[in-house]
Amino acid sequence: MANTSATGGYLTPNPTPVVTEDQALRQLIHGVIQGVTGLAADRVRQAWQPTPAPVLPLETNWGAFAIMVQRGDFDPYTIENDIGTFESMTRNEEVEILCTFYGPNCQANASYLRDGMAISQNNDVLFSVGAAVVGFGDIIHAPELVNDRFVDRADITMTLRRQIVRSYPILSFLAAQGTIYSETLSEPWVVDPQGVIP
């Protein structure tokens, strides 16, 4: 059983709300790149796969991507829910994704991604998970030497901004009972769950 603020110990987030992370986030990004560039689904790959796919011929247009940085804002904020059973922590985060395109149209595909994400409809899937593209880096032409031959390559960094919401089991005082003594009060106050009785 997970800890709460009443039990003490470390608190872990509740499984809901769901934050798109790891493989789910990579699948989302894969779909965005594939859809906006028009490349076939099997021509957009995640970088650093456990079992790398075979190298494609030099004349093939394809792309790879990797989540490089997830940079959270310094100060998240918390909000207590209406019934006092958890607090939601909200933080804004930037996600930097290195997109690498190969083949004779590598620079065009990098620009298709950059320019295509300026179209509102192409952002719908990101909006649905609370994210949006906030910028791109320069397109860097960087041919790569593979088996003594240069493969045409272009790199571009895409930056997303999104909101992360996590819920923690932090309980609130909904009622208390006891007696309050103070040097400034002439008589102690008795507190019961219905309120304060002078």
Image: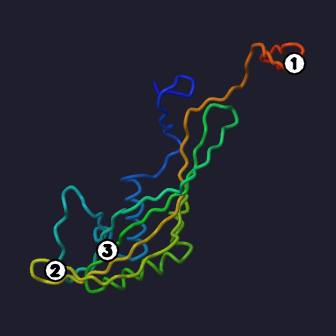
Q: CA distance from mark 3 to mark 1?
A: 72 Å
Disc 3 crowd rating (10 Å Cα; few below 14, some 14-19, many 20+) is: many
Distance from label 1 to label 2 (Cα)? 83 Å
Amino acid type, mark 1 = Leu
Looking at the rendered structure, the secondary structure element under dot 1 is loop
Marks 3 and 2, Cα distance to the nearest angstrom? 15 Å
Q: Which residue was labeled with disc 1? A: 185
Q: Residue at x 34, y 75 (%)?
A: 39
Q: Quadrant of residue 79?
A: top right
Position of the N terminus, as image quadrant, is top left
Toward the front, the furthest residue is 183
The disc at residue 96 is none
> Sequence order check: which comes first, mark 1 or mark 2?
2
Q: Amino acid at mark 2?
A: Leu
Mark 2 surroundings: few (<14), some (14-19) or many (≥20) residues within 10 A: few
List x then y, in percent, for residue 168. Answer: 55, 37
Mark 1 against mark 2, which lies toward the viewer? 1
**Circle 3/circle 2 CB separation < 8 Å:** no
* 3 or 2: tag closer to the N-terminus: 3
Residue 100: where, in percent of width, then height? 31, 74
Instruction: Quickly name the residue at label 3.
Output: 100
**Residue 145 disc label:** 2
How many other residues sit within 10 Å of disc 1, few (<14), some (14-19) or many (≥20)? few
x then y, percent, for residue 129: 52, 57
Say what amino acid the circle numbered 3 marks: Thr
The foreground one among 29 and 6 is 6
* Residue at x-position 43% and y-position 77%: 137
Q: Is residue 86 above or below residue 93?
A: above
